[in-house]
Image (tube, helix red, strand yellow):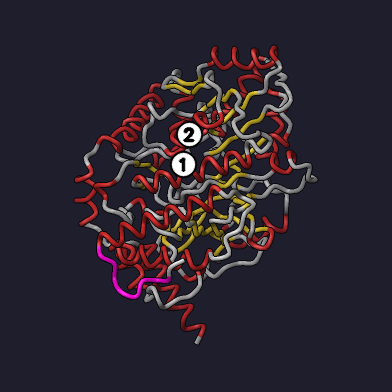
Amino acid sequence: MSKLPSTPLNSSEAEAERHLLTEDVLKFIEAGVDSGIPDFNDYALRIFALHYKVNSIFREFCDAKKVRPGDINRWEDVPMVYNDVFKTHLVASFPLEKSVMACLTGGTTSLTQRGRIFRDEDGKRLVFAANKMMTGSYLFPDFADGKRCRVLILAPSPELAPSMGMAIGIDQTRQHFGTPDSMFLLGKSGIHINELLKALRESETSGVPVALIGATSAYVYFFQACRRKKMKFCLPAGSRICDGGGYRGRFGKATRDDYYAMVQEALGIPESHCVNVLGEAETATNLFDDSLRRYAKGLPPRRRTRPVPPWCKVRAMSIDDLSPLPDGEIGLLAHWDLANVPTVLAVITDNLGYTTDNGQGCEMVGRAKIESGRVSPLPDETAGSPMGDSAIFRMLERYVNFSIELKMAMAKDPKVAPSEREEVEARPGSVPSCPQVVDEILVSQQDAEAAQLRDEALGTFKDQTERPIEWFEEEAKKQKLTDHPAGLKSEKQSQKKGKKGK
């Protein structure tokens, strides 16, 4: 492959370089999750050089950190941009007028703002290719090429929420892996319960497996309704369920083990066929846990992890100095994704987690937020045990005194005070997170306030796609990345780390 450019790129050269990188990365993705990329480092540095040239906000960030192309020779040293920067800045490495795809992301570090992620045609191809490969490898690992099944979706459709990444990604899964009778079953007024029950009974009767995909909270809500109605299904072998989006506790206490038990009880789907997906709109590649893939390959069960595909790297970074941590130690998860050609290569998230298998896998254990340059826990999260490892949880508590099980009970319980997070999200001008949007949809028929929040949130997702691109360009001119607390934090930490090295 070509070396880093020795002279600055002009606009036409930058466009050509973007396209060449896209084609190469697409080949890596199409080679599959078991392939290898021996020159990952070279490609990472090449993408860094391109982003430094064409992305003025990112270039300012790198200059503040005193890290420029040619100064580093390892992918680990490419500056990491905090994911909450996407809430205050337009981080695009292509001309915005070429945007063909826009997504909103909630995240958790800024409770009253949403991120805006744009992709051009090449970026759209990259994110769709990565989604297809990862979904096929981890949710349908036992499917031969071209095999399909009925997909039942408990998440908003792209028509309902056109800029919601979950809606866009799941619709791509429906198109690639679903039969024509696949359907979205979460509408504006909640779950289309009659259609869902009919589809589940049809699968029972016919013996044809189905795949359920959707938001974790929607499944918890449905499973609890099944318990109250003493309703159970026995779906045929080969049926599977994939959940994502997190669970905020709106419908009662539920650990990950509780969730698996509810799936088995309500649907007859074993834990081996329960798959969780971690998606970050700021990165192109979703990470799936490996339980079903290991089962399909006849490998012995083990504690779940999320294998990292060859076109990505993931590290857990210390909350003290952002240095990489060894396997098993919990920090902020950072992603280096070659498929991020239209944005920035390296993103450090508000996900707390750890790596496994010498950095080849990772697991998320909760979320944190960054306030005034410090990591702190989300106020509405309390200790739980999705991992079942007390040593790891003691380590986590030492860092931020927090883990992932939420403490909220049923929304209508008058004895339960709203969490600080819910109070923030309910303030005028705030925008609900994606999981909250699903929650409000689920209870909107019985709760006028929830219906209002639902309408406002769905309107925001539609507004994102209807605004002219000129509006976003004008907003971008007003911004400086180094004004952002996360940007300043990174610069100070970098300087602190440099002094230590001396």
Compared with 56, 432 (above or below) is above
Question: Going 67% across and 45% down the picture, which residue do you hit?
Answer: 290
Left or right of 162 in this view: 128: right
**Quick one: 22 or 240, which is closer to the camera?**
22
Q: Quadrant of residue 359?
A: bottom right
| Secondary structure beneath label 1 | helix
Instruction: Provide residue 412's location: percent of width, then percent of height.
Output: 51, 26
Kindly identify the amino acid type of the residue bearing the numbered disc 2.
Gln
Left or right of 114 in this view: 270: right
In this view of the protein, can residue 414 be seen by the observer? no
**Quick one: 387 or 199, which is closer to the camera?**
199
Question: Going 32% across and 35% down the picture, which residue do you hit?
Answer: 460
Q: Which residues are magenta?
A: 3-10
Label 1 neighbourhood size at 10 Å, few (<14), some (14-19), many (20+)? some
Compared with 234, 166 (above or below) is below
Q: How many marks?
A: 2
User: Most extreme residue toward the bottom, as rendered?
Assistant: 502
Question: Going 31% across and 32% down the picture, which residue do you hit?
Answer: 462
Q: Quadrant of residue 333?
A: bottom right
Instruction: Provide residue 51's location: percent of width, then percent of height.
Output: 35, 62
Instruction: Provide residue 472's location: percent of width, then percent of height.
Output: 24, 47
Q: Mark 2 highlights which residue?
A: 172
Q: What number is the disc on residue 128? A: 1
Kindly identify the amino acid type of the residue bearing the numbered disc 1.
Phe
| Secondary structure beneath label 2 | helix
